[in-house]
Image (cartoon, rainbow, N blue to C red):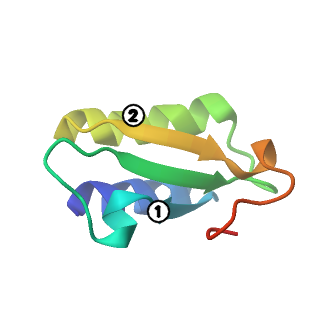
Amino acid sequence: MITWIDIRDQLSKAGVSALLYGSLANGGFMPHSDLDILVQSRGSAASTADIYGIVHGVASASNIEVDLFFEEDFPSGIDGIT
């Protein structure tokens, strides 16, 4: 999906890593599905606001919803992702 690639590339330019999970990553993406993205921003100069701006700027151009999660919000990791 081009939106995911665009988001990943824009975040990478800002020094932020991102992982795709959920229905698109698992092959079950439907027309009503959203993107589920886990952001890994430790060590990046990008603020949370910067990251939201990047993600939602790209996603709004494609009219797709994004669920954005930050790795630091899950200190024990997320099963199946980290």
Residue tagged by mark 2? 56
User: What x and y, as percent, mark residue 25?
Assistant: 38, 68
Given the image, on which type of amino acid does mark 1 rest? Leu
Residue depicted at 52% across the width and 33% down the height: 52
Q: Earlier in the sequence, mark 2 or mark 1?
A: 1
Q: Report crowding for label 1: few under 14, some 14 to 19, many 20 or more residues within 10 A (C-alpha).
A: some
Horizontally, is 48 left or right of 5 in the view?
right
Residue depicted at 34% across the width and 59% down the height: 23
Horizontally, is 8 left or right of 82 in the view?
left
User: In this rendering, which labeled residue sits more in front, label 2 or label 1?
Assistant: 1
17 versus 62 height, above or below: below
- In the picture, the quarter occupied by the C terminus is bottom right
Q: CA distance from mark 2 to mark 1?
A: 15 Å
Q: Report crowding for label 2: few under 14, some 14 to 19, many 20 or more residues within 10 A (C-alpha).
A: some
Residue depicted at 53% across the width and 41% down the height: 68
Residue tagged by mark 1? 20
